[in-house]
Amino acid sequence: MSTRIEIKEECAPSINLLIQNCCDPLIQEIIPFGIPEIPPIGAFSDIDGNCWTLLGTTEDEVNSIRKSMGQYGSCATCLDENPCPENLRVDSCCATFATIFSSTLPGVGVGDTFSDTFGFCWTVTGTTPAPINGVVSVASIYLAEDCTTCLGDNICPTIYSITSCCQSRCNLNLRVELFTTLDQLGGGVPGEIFLDTLGFCWQISLSPMVDFTLLTGSFIQYDSSYVDCEVCVENNYDCNTPVFYTIKNCITQEIAIVQAPFGYSVGNSLKLNFTTDLTPQCWEIISWDRTSLPTKIIEEIFNCFKNCITCANG
């Protein structure tokens, strides 16, 4: 009789790098640690001439690969030699809809078509100095092709609205509304009331959206089903629960994280000031979560607007 003892080592989580684009701070990527010529601190330019700054390390999974063409002490010094390129004008292959994406999309140029990780196909029609309207990641690229091949490989996803069980803080006659797909939501059926993984309650629209729109609720994930909104809210976070909002300055494009009560929607613009800067400025809501650490502390929220344009005119 013999006994064999196996000793198994647990794999240590890999340490990767979190980087942020110097021209569009909303764009962050996770790249492997230890790529040659990429410094552990400071900034670098990639092979396409985009500048990136190192935010720190993370155990989250890699979602991009960038090769360094030069090291710099900061975004400012990198941008001195590598000015921000124009962004990409794109047309949806799924509907009559045009928007602007970042030129940092790897391998994508004018005349190309690509699918994003949500399953939508886009064709690049030109460039523009105008700011981006949304953030996507590339799944597949179809070089110098129109929409035909991409649509043959990808079925355009169906978009649904999800409506919060809480009132909007921008308009008390409305509720917070976001747009997503059932696949991206990770569960649920049309018309269902559900709890998300952040502890808030929503209802999925009975019918898909008629008009195409960008996904504003891709960060919302399905947790469990409820019979109605009242029961869901009573058993989970109420509508005054604070969350951590990622916001973007409407003029400078600076990104910040602030704490405020739930109820401001993606795309809303807040006119506010901070404890460190009392000048009122307009900031756009990008997303929210329950775990981030604030980078700024709000002194006062003066008003809420539909978007940056109405905030600037208000």
Image (tube, rainbow, N blue to C red):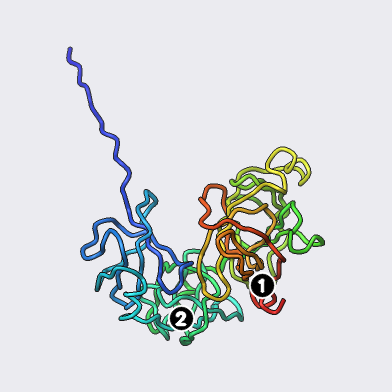
Query: With respect to residue 60, does 207 lie above or below?
Result: below
Mark 1 to mark 2: distance in Å? Answer: 21 Å
Residue named by callout 2: 87
Circles 1 and 2 in contact, beta carbons < 8 Å: no
Q: Nearer the viewer, residue 85 or 183?
A: 85
Q: Position of residue 194 (x, y in %)?
A: 68, 47
Q: Quadrant of the N terminus?
A: top left
**Whether residue 48 can be seen here:** yes
Residue farthest to the left? 2
Residue type at numbered disc 2: Asn
Tell me if mark 1 has few (under 14), some (14-19) or many (20+) residues whose alpha carbon lies within 10 angstroms of its own: some
Say left or right for 262 vs 292: right
Residue farthest to the top? 1
Q: Position of residue 124 (x, y in %)?
A: 46, 82
Asked which secondary structure carries label 2, the reply is strand
Residue type at numbered disc 1: Asn
Residue named by callout 1: 307
Identify the residue at horizontal 46%, vertical 72% (top origin).
24
Q: Nearer the viewer, residue 259 or 18?
A: 259
Identify the residue at horizontal 61%, vertical 81% (top origin).
96
Quadrant for residue 226, please give it. Answer: top right
Q: Position of residue 298 (x, y in %)?
A: 61, 58
